[in-house]
Each structure stands twice: as C-alpha cells, then as structure tokens.
Amino acid sequence: MKGKIILLSSIVLATVGISAYAGPEQDRVAFQKFFHDKFPRTPKADFINGIYSIDAASREQWLEIEEFPPYEIAIEEGEELFNTSFKNGKSYADCFENDGKNSRKNYPYFDPKRAEVVTLELAINDCRVANGEEPLKYAKGKLAAISAYLSFVSRGERINVVIPDNAGALQAYENGKEFYYRKRGQLNFSCFDCHGAASGQRVRADRLSPALGHVSHFPVYRSKWGGMGTLHRRFKGCNEQVRAKGLNPQSQAYKELEYFLSYMSNGLEFNGPGARK
C-alpha cells in the first residue's frame, strides 16, 4: 500500500513538473509555469485576483462589487483595534515594525527557535499574549479585521517567502507540499485536484480558481459567509467540502500548507483584503 501511495503521489507531482525530491525553487518555477501555460491569456501579475483573473463574466461582477467593497468596514475596524492600547499601555504597533505598514510581506516565515511556521494571524495573537491579553479566535471576527487592515496597508508589496538553510524549515515546506498533493476525504480529492488540474472548470454554477496567487488576497469577505474570514478558515472549509475532517485554523498542517503556497506565489503582489463569492 505504501508503494502505491508513493507512485500516485509521483504521478500527481509530475503533472506540474514537480518532483517529490526537487528543491523549493525548482518547485516554484514548475508550479508557476503550469498555471501560465494553462491560462496563457492571463497576465502573470493578474493571478492575484483568483477566479476573476481567468473568468471574464465573474470579473465584471467583481469589479462592480469593488466599487463599494464589503471589506471596508473590516479595514476600519481593524485599524481601530490595531491602534487601541492594551491594558499595559502598549499596542500592536510595538510588535509590528513601521506601525504595521508593509508588514504583510514578512509572513509567513519559519522561526528556527520555535521550530514552526509563523503566520500573520499567529503573530497578531503572539503580540496580544506577550502584552497580557487573551488571544483572539483565528477564523474570523476581530483577528480577521486586524489582518485585513495589515493586509490593506501592505498592498503592492511582493510575496517573498524565504526557505532558510535549515532542516526544520525545509521539512515544514515539504510537509506543506505533501499536504497540498495528498488526496483526502470521502471524495478523495487533493488541493491540486480542484485548484490545479481542474482549475477553470465548473462545479455547479461556480468555476474553480487557480492556486497560483491564492494567498495574496486574504483575508476575504465571502458572500457565502456574510463576513470576513482568514485563509485558514478557507482551508478548513475546503477540507470539509471534500468530506474530510477540517483542522483547526493555525494547526501545524495549515501553517505549513500556507508556507508552501506562499512560496509558490513568490513574486506576486499582495492585494488583500479581497471579496469573493
């Protein structure tokens, strides 16, 4: 059975020219080439717009929504929360350089001392705990609002995730890569099945978005949610949609998946927060 799993994984990886034993940069080049070849009419920089980069009809509707974006309230709330002092007199500005401006580009990263991937949302709660405050829930609410504000003031910065020369960092990257290509749930789908091989195809009334650039526009306001949600909220929802067990936001697996996907999108701009169906 183990041999069959390895063989199937190799077939899937070969679809995008990625080897189970290739280095991160080789993976990134092959990953981006796969989507550039699959959607040759889409400008490379436009993949940050998700499904709206490949579906003209959806894009028109989205541009109308962007005239009065539903995430504006979250940005305003996040800015107020970011600038509100903790009980000890300090604030988030004491944890994030340059008052938070352009700080989105610093995440995710691998912290060798903690031996884990640190995401923006984790850093927000780390700041709270370090200053004697209770951590916020990771999927939505106030934390998503703060993340939306920090993403907004970082628009235009480029994704530039670094995999340091560290065994733990490389393992975290490989774990995220393995999670992305592994089939799961009763439907036996992987992340790649929907957002790689089948990207651009319809699932009922909607089209599946390409994975390249996925991380650039989170957190997002989803009409389906009626509010804001973080990237890990979406990861959890995707897992549940294929009838697999959804993991908790900021679980090790989801942090490492974010690490992998962010590295795959290196060079693209951050344009969050976003609005999606």
Image: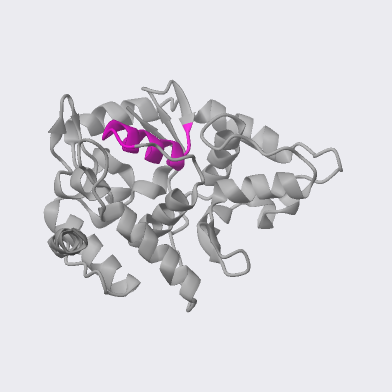
* Position of residue 167 in the picture relative to residue 57 (left or right): right
Which residue does the image show at 31% across and 75% down from the upper left? Answer: 23
Q: Position of residue 156 (x, y in %)?
A: 45, 53
Q: Residue furthest right?
A: 88
Quadrant assignment, res 79: top right
The magenta segment is 229-244
User: Residue at (38%, 30%) from the top-left corner?
Assistant: 66
Q: Does residue 217 appear to the left or right of 62 in the view shown?
A: right
Q: Nearer the viewer, residue 251 or 192?
A: 251
Q: Is residue 34 magenta?
A: no
What is the x, y in percent for residue 208? 21, 38
x and y percent of residue 54 in the render?
Answer: 19, 42
Q: Residue at x 27, y 68 (%)?
A: 27
Q: Residue at x 62, y 51 (%)?
A: 123
Q: Quick check: 263 above or below 55?
A: below
Q: Position of residue 131 (x, y in %)?
A: 79, 47
Quadrant in the picture for the C terminus = top left
Instruction: Please tell me in which quadrant of the rendered image residue 231 appears.
Output: top left
In the foreground, 187 or 41? 187
Q: Magenta stretch containing residue 242, yes or no?
A: yes
